[in-house]
Image: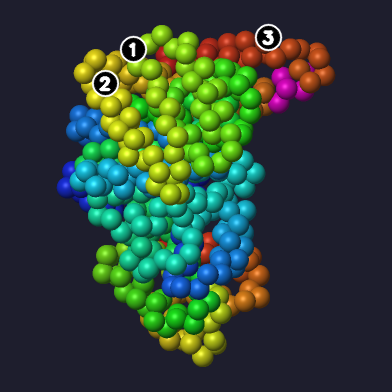
């Protein structure tokens, strides 16, 4: 068996809706990836430590609470401080207004997938944009 | 990663994580490093947590680790979940129950997929134990996949095995069947606030009546979610580890698992280097057809193929 892509699917912040995260986790599993799923209400620090210990290739953040502009750049910055951002592809998904997307990309989120995105699009993006 | 070996000696978290990944991917350079550093391992005590799916292994692990942290011990966790035999993917969800531990600097959690390995662990689990041992963990807890009746690999890897049961899974015949029920050094009945806990306790106790070893596995009723009975369970675990130490059985167990590990590595090498499926593919195809159509049988076919491989390899060897 060759090297499977390892993905951390995490839900930062306080919203309690993880259906989207579970759908994407399952789709990535079916695409042959190893998905570390951490569940709800993760702090940026928990997500960053998990990403390091699990040595993941991708961090996929699902957020529906509206706190994306606050939480997502924080996670990217912590990954940078820990010196792992260069090796990890950081993605976001969930309810994120189009107007906020350029700012998030500027902050280091490589792609934002909003509701309705076919899972195949996300899978292909991951396969084509891995950093290591 | 540059100077992985040096960073491992310096107990770098990132290097340890990368090392485990490389071991999982069967990277020869990682094996090389592990061979060099092997003499530095063997310090951590290894605790196996096994039991059927949904028994509460992750929740119990979370609580046991918190107990060990109170004693100021550093703990590594290896949590194994199944890999899909169809897609090769997996959902590694054991961390859900261990959220509080994610930021504890004295805890290192690693999730692993079985990647096609049967027996309740992955092939790289033993290597990961050594990596966490190097990282300076006092205890390493291995949580197996949810097991059925015969996934007993954990005995080869752990010093102490905790078998987690729940009430209501079957009658007393289940308790005397061969397999996983034979490997527990300690039995935990989780979700003991549910109906049937006393009955399950009795059935396990009856089964253990026939155990004639010095160490009689204790049975502890716990409710992991409510943190009930965890202190007692942890004491049983530490007692057992202490018992192994004082009776010299720890070294016996480790000699036994080293013996198995060496044999397994030899078999693996033989299969990988000697009997390459791509080399024998044509012959294999012919044989398979013959066997399916009853023109040959698998017993003789395997003999013939093996003879062919050995003769070929012997010639290669002479030409070297």
Q: The residue tagged with tag 3: helix, strand or loop? A: helix
Alpha-carbon neighbours of circle 1 within 10 Å: few (<14), some, or many (≥20)? few
Image mark for residue B243:
2
Residue indicated by mark 1: B214
Marks 1 and 2, the one that precedes in the sequence: 1
* Residue pictured at 45% horizontal, 80% vertical: A68
Chain assignment, label 3: B
Residue indicated by mark 3: B300
- Region of the chain picked out in magenta, as a range: B285-290
Viewer-proximal residue among B111 and B51: B51
Alpha-carbon neighbours of circle 2 within 10 Å: few (<14), some, or many (≥20)? some
The answer to whether any part of residue A86 appears in the image is: no
**Identity of the residue furthest to the right in this view:** B293
**Overall secondary structure of the magenta stretch?**
helix
The answer to whether any part of residue A99 appears in the image is: yes
Q: Is residue B285 left or right of residue B28?
A: right
- Examine the rendered structure and indicate whether residue B30 appears above or below residue B238: below
Chain assignment, label 1: B
- Percent position of residue B151, x then y: 53, 28
- For residue B284, which quarter of the picture? top right
Viewer-proximal residue among B54 and A69: B54
Q: Is residue A45 left or right of residue B191?
A: left
Look at the numbered discs 1 and 2 and tell me whether their residues touch, using CB distance below 8 Å: yes
* Residue pictured at 40% horizontal, 44% vertical: B228
Q: Is residue B24 left or right of residue B240?
A: right
Q: The residue tagged with tag 2: helix, strand or loop? A: helix
Image mark for residue B227:
none
- Percent position of residue B154, x then y: 43, 29
- Percent position of residue A21, x then y: 56, 65
């Amino acid at each position: 068996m060759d090297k499977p892509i390892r993905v951390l699917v995490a839900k930062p912040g306080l919203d309690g809706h993880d259906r989207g995260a579970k759908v994407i986790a399952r789709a990535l599993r079916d695409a042959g990836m190893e998905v570390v799923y951490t569940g709800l209400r993760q702090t940026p620090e928990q997500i960053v430590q998990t990403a390091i210990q699990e040595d993941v290739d991708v961090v996929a953040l699902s957020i529906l609470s509206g706190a994306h502009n606050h939480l997502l750049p924080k996670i990217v910055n912590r990954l940078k401080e820990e010196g792992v951002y260069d090796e990890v592809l950081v993605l976001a998904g969930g309810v994120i207004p189009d107007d906020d997307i350029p700012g998030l990309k500027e902050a280091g989120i490589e792609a934002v997938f909003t509701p309705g995105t076919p899972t195949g699009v996300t899978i292909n993006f991951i396969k084509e944009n891995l950093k290591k | 990663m540059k100077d992985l070996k040096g960073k491992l000696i310096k107990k770098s978290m990132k290097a340890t994580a990368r090392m485990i990944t490389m071991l999982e991917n069967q990277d020869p350079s990682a094996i090389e490093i592990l061979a060099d550093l092997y003499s530095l391992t063997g310090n951590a005590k290894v605790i196996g947590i096994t039991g059927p799916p949904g028994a509460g292994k992750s929740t119990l692990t979370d609580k046991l680790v918190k107990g060990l942290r109170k004693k100021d011990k550093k703990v590594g966790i290896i949590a194994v979940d199944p890999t899909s035999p169809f897609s090769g993917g997996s959902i590694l969800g054991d961390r859900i129950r261990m959220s509080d531990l994610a930021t504890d600097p004295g805890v290192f959690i690693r999730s692993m997929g079985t990647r096609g390995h049967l027996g309740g662990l992955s092939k790289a689990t033993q290597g990961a134990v050594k990596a966490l041992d190097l990282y300076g963990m006092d205890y390493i807890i291995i949580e197996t996949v949810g097991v059925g009746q015969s996934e007993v690999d954990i005995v080869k890897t752990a010093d102490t095995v905790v078998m987690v049961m729940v009430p209501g899974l079957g009658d007393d015949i289940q308790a005397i069947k061969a397999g996983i029920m034979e490997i527990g050094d300690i039995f935990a009945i989780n979700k003991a606030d549910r109906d049937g806990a006393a009955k399950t306790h009795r059935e396990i106790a009856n089964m253990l009546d026939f155990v004639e070893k010095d160490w009689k596995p204790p049975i502890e009723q716990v409710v992991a979610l409510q943190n009930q009975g965890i202190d007692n369970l942890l004491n049983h675990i530490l007692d057992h580890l202490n018992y192994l130490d004082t009776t010299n059985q720890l070294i016996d167990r480790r000699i036994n698992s080293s013996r198995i590990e060496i044999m397994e590595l030899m078999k693996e090498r033989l299969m990988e280097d000697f009997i390459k499926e791509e080399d024998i593919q044509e012959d294999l195809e012919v044989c398979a057809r013959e066997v399916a159509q009853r023109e040959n049988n698998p017993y003789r076919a395997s003999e013939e193929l093996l003879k062919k491989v050995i003769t070929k390899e012997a010639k290669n060897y002479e030409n070297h």
